[in-house]
């Protein structure tokens, strides 16, 4: 028996399957952790199972990539390409973080309705609401976030008293505990099943925003991740690890932030009111990145020609590429209806913002800025604890592996 979604036929699992999205899990973190010898289980997965270099979708932000993983498809299929876009009629920045923006069902929706006991456990509640759209909760299916684990109900989440069930207090939203709670809940879910279960465990990138790959805190976090992966492996689960995006340092050698305040520059060049910059990375976790990322949308008004805006932005130091709306939508498979007139992507060591007044850098507490959103954060790990069968080995060698292929490979591709 199989289930189908967006042109992919998924095999009903014969063993439990746990897919872990390591938010901000740049390959450099896995490389550093392997070198330090703190991830023996994942190291074994990479040697005896499968390890590949995949791409995430652009913009390399959390929501569009988690939804691509959940739907097995790029953003022009599921409809979400960031956290915000501009409503041209009202002039208001509109959030894209609600279920209403989604144009596709998810693997979890389809699986839960097919009788596969399914868990979606996220660090951030904004993701839980989108990923859980259409899911049948209850009867073994659960969908909750560690951020709101103290508010779960049977009606909305399929489970109550999550803190008692996991045996841990509510974690702080700015801590590695927010992710470890997700992993421990996932282990509990898989361990309790009397038949194969499907789990999606989406973490938060608190550690990666704050610490470089070889920092002791980052290594300790990946060691903790490894211990949970080893538990899932011992339970007989197929374990897959991917990331929603990479993570790069955005500072000069002296520690100053490499920032492009693009709205300021455009206002000086063309005058106020002629353009509007939208930063689609903006979310409640401003202490992670100060709403500064590597991809922004620019909207042009009045008599300003898009080509004139593009030529000017191309001259700005730190800008990698500037794409007209249709070109951006085609190149990155984005929903064209919510794209700006111009998509701007920063070089690897830079972030793009609006004006200094729009970004509260005090929340960064003087620490180095690490962020994502551009092409420089596109490469992500793709790891399975089991080897691939012949068909999927051939596929992995002939196609550009995407992070949203992970459920296809985990359900259909293991030997």
Image (cartoon, grey):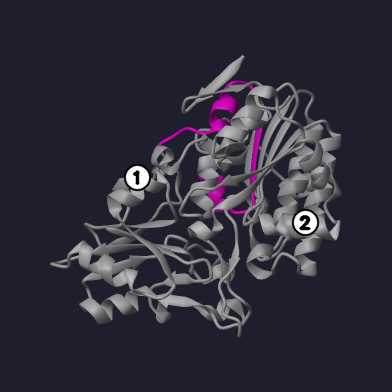
Residue sitting nearer the eye, 62 or 349: 349
Relative horizontal placement of residue 193, taking residue 91 as reference (left or right): right
Q: Is residue 114 magenta?
A: yes
Tag 2 secondary structure: helix
Residue sitting nearer the eye, 133 or 352: 352
Q: Residue furthest left?
A: 303
Q: Which residue: 42% across, 81% down? A: 356
Q: Which residue: 51% across, 35% down? A: 71
User: Can you identify the residue that label 1 sits on?
Assistant: 330
Q: What are the residue bounds of the magenta stretch?
A: 103-130
Relative horizontal placement of residue 71, taking residue 325 as reference (left or right): right
Q: Say if 42 sits above or below 399 in the image.
A: below
Residue sitting nearer the eye, 190 or 264: 264
Tag 1 secondary structure: helix
Q: CA distance from mark 1 to mark 2?
A: 36 Å
Q: Position of residue 388 (x, y in %)?
A: 71, 29
Q: Which quadrant holds residue 315?
A: bottom left
Q: Say if 305 sits above or below 237 in the image.
A: below
User: Can you identify the residue that label 2 sits on?
Assistant: 222
Which part of the image, by quadrant, shows the N terminus?
A: top right
Q: Earlier in the sequence, mark 1 or mark 2?
A: 2
Q: Which residue: 60% across, 61% down? A: 247
Q: Residue furthest top?
A: 1
Q: Position of residue 316 (x, y in %)?
A: 36, 74
């Amino acid at each position: 028996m199989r289930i189908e979604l967006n042109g992919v036929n998924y095999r009903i699992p014969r063993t439990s399957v746990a897919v872990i999205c390591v938010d901000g899990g740049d390959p450099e973190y896995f490389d550093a952790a392997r070198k330090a010898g703190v991830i023996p289980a994942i190291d074994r997965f990479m040697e005896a199972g499968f390890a590949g270099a995949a791409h995430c979708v652009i913009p390399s932000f959390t929501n569009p990539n988690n939804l691509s993983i959940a739907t097995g498809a790029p953003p022009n299929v599921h409809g979400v390409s960031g956290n915000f876009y501009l409503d041209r009629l009202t002039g208001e920045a509109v959030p894209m973080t609600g279920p209403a923006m989604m144009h596709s069902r998810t693997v979890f929706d389809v699986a839960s309705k097919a009788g596969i006991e399914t868990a979606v456990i996220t660090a951030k509640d904004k993701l839980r609401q989108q990923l859980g759209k259409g899911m049948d909760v209850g009867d073994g299916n659960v969908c909750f976030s560690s951020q709101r684990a103290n508010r779960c109900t049977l009606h909305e989440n399929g489970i109550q008293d999550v803190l008692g069930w996991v045996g841990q207090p509510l974690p702080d939203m700015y801590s590695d505990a927010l992710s470890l709670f997700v992993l421990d809940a996932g282990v509990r879910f898989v361990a309790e099943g009397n038949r194969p279960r499907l789990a999606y465990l989406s973490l938060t990138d608190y550690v990666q925003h704050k610490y470089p790959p070889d920092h002791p805190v980052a290594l300790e976090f990946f060691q903790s991740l490894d211990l949970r992966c080893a538990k899932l492996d011992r339970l007989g689960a197929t374990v897959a690890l991917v990331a929603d995006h990479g993570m790069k340092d955005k500072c000069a050698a002296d520690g100053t932030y490499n920032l492009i305040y693009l709205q300021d520059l455009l206002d000086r060049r063309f005058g106020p009111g002629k353009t509007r910059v939208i930063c689609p990375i903006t979310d409640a976790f401003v202490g992670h990145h100060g709403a500064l990322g590597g991809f922004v949308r620019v909207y042009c008004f009045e008599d300003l020609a898009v080509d004139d805006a593009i030529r000017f932005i191309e001259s700005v130091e730190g800008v990698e590429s500037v794409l007209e709306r249709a070109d951006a939508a085609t190149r990155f498979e984005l929903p064209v209806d919510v794209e700006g007139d111009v998509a701007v992507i920063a070089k690897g060591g830079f972030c793009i913002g609006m004006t200094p007044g729009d970004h509260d850098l005090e929340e960064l507490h003087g620490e180095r800025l690490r962020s994502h959103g551009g092409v420089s954060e596109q490469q992500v790990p793709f790891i399975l604890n089991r080897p691939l069968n012949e068909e999927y080995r051939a596929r992995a060698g002939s196609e550009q592996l995407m992070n949203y292929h992970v459920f296809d490979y985990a359900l259909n591709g293991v030997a």
